[in-house]
Amino acid sequence: MLVLHEFRRYVRIPLMTEVSIVSNDGRRLSASSLEVSSGGMSVKCSEDLSAGTNVEVSFALLTLPRVWIRGAVSWKKPKSFGVRFETADERRQKLKAWIDGYLES
């Protein structure tokens, strides 16, 4: 049972990069990524967003030019929170392709 709870749908890569976040109310935040996957990312941020807040994040990864992906805050802790990307947002396919290539190298 413990193994089932530890199963993760997406591979998470510990990677630090600058992340720009725009919330649905127009707030603009600067953050740093902690982990990234094709399903979402965790970020470190001095400002707080509530779980369920719709956001659009933008970031660049090494050889991946800046991408913008819609999502929602899925969890929060002091000074960090997680963003789950919208599955309907086709722009996340660029990130998925980059992660697949990163894992193969």
Image (cartoon, rainbow, N blue to C red):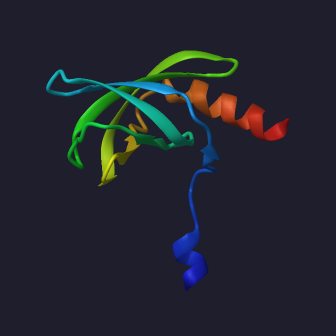
78 or 5, nearer to the observer: 78
x%, y% of residue 78?
Answer: 30, 53
Q: In the rendered image, which quarter is residue 57 located in?
A: top left
x%, y% of residue 12?
Answer: 60, 49
Residue farthest to the top, as pictured: 65
**Residue plotted at (30% across, 44% down):** 73
Instruction: Judge whether 100 appears above or below 29 on screen.
Output: below
**Residue plotted at (59% across, 29% down):** 95
Residue farthest to the left, as pictured: 25
Quarter of the figure with the N terminus: bottom right
- Direction from residue 40 to residue 70 in the image, left or right: left
**Residue plotted at (56% across, 56% down):** 9
Instruction: Judge whether 66 appears above or below 55 on screen.
Output: above
14 or 97, nearer to the observer: 14
**Residue plotted at (50% across, 19% down):** 67
Residue farthest to the bottom, as pictured: 1
x%, y% of residue 23?
Answer: 23, 28
- Direction from residue 33 to residue 83 in the image, left or right: left
1 or 73, nearer to the observer: 73
x%, y% of residue 97?
Answer: 67, 29
